Amino acid sequence: MKELFEQISKLKNEYDKLRENNRFNVITALHKERDEVNLHSRIISYLLSPTSGHGMNGIYLKLFVREILGLDDKQFDLTNVIVVPNETEKSEYKEIDILIVNKRTSQAIIIENKIDAKDSNHPTNRDGYQGQLERYYNTIKTGKDKDKKPCIEYQSNNVFVYYLSMNGKPDKDNIEISIGMLNDDEHGSWDDSHILSYDSHIREWLAKCIESITDEKLQVKNFIQHYLNVINKLTNNDMTVEERLELKHIVAENIVETRHLIENFKHVKWHTVHEFWTELKSKLESENQLKNVSFYIDREDYSFEKAIDEVTHHNKDINHGLLFDIGDKKAYISGLGKLSWGIMHPKKWTNFMNEKIEDINFSVFSSESTYNLIDKTKMTDAVKYIIDEIIESRNNDFQTLKQNTD
């Protein structure tokens, strides 16, 4: 096993040097790679909008709707289409990540973009909806928002809803709640074809966009290539063919050891997550400003250990974490989706800001900050960063938290 790791490390170091020489990327110079809203949703909507400054009119929109979504001209007419957000309207419409509308034909496409964030779902029907996708569908279909207020600007009779995630494999229980009534016999408008991935669909679309660009649009081509490079890195598709073949050769020489690691890595994840919550609980209990620390799990039929098993062995998105008192406030740290924390009354929350812990996500377990928790020293450091942010927020009257309006 040690020899296997040494060979892989040597291979990675060799190709990392080559990647470093080609590291320049204008997009990552300005944004964090996993910034769901300000990076990915904005770039995708910018490219889709026919009125954007890329000057390619509706070519990218046509490639996406016809070849990626598979909608024909009767299902969705591409003339005079509006995409929100866009260069003029930079904010989301009613919290919808990407909205594509043909007002003349009363047709709409909703794209919910999920990288690290969790779905705003409710096990019981609230305000007329259970899940996030169901609410967005209702908003556009009926012309009424979640508060039942009229919003007829983009009201459409024919609404298609899509769920975009990194690997196209959202948690089954979570997505069933999110789509809500879209999965019943009456509506019949949801199946697996409405689940999109960056790994497959977005990479394919961006490659088609690049192929469609003529020489006079070199700046646009370079921009899209930079974005495709970001996606390739996030989806682990940035290895050259030569590196892949060399890695395959190393695996072939160490088949037994490699198989042993792959088959048992779920146990590595389980113990990492369990040790993280245990150490965090212990450190919280030692803080004078924090009281009554306890584990919690948003499933009455699960123990905390069972929740960790579902998260690490089956990639389930389950709300679990720690409850505690901070002053006169009830607070929590949640492991649902990206690690976050907040207070109960009034309901306010935030993701963690420190770059060492901002991308911790146990159900996905793919970010560097999550992997680093396997190392005990780095786990201890992460726990310290978490507590420091909570105490600092408490000292500033929780100004870093945002109101939960959902």
Image (cartoon, rainbow, N blue to C red):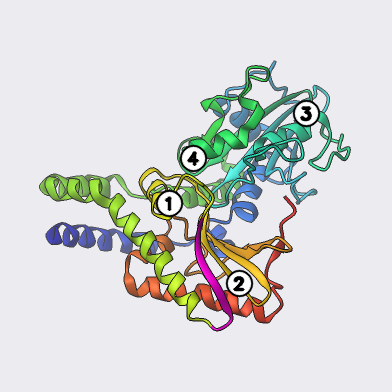
Query: Could you tell whether 22 is left or right of 253 in the image?
Result: right
Label 1 vs label 2: CA separation? Answer: 22 Å
Residue that label 3 marks: 141
Q: Judge by depth and name the residue closer to the eye, 93 or 232.
A: 93
Choose the circle earlier in sequence order: 4 or 1.
Answer: 4
Choose the circle earlier in sequence order: 2 or 4.
Answer: 4
Q: Residue at x 59, y 49 (%)?
A: 40
> Would you say residue 210 is visible in this rendering?
no
Mark 4 lies on a secondary structure that is loop
Magenta-drawn segment: 288-296
Q: Do the residues labelled 3 and 1 touch (CB within 8 Å)?
A: no
Q: Which residue is drawn at 80% across and 49% down?
A: 88
Residue that label 1 marks: 303
Label 3 vs label 1: CA separation? Answer: 40 Å
Residue that label 2 marks: 325
Identify the amino acid type marked 4. Asp
Residue 98 sits in which quadrant? Answer: top right
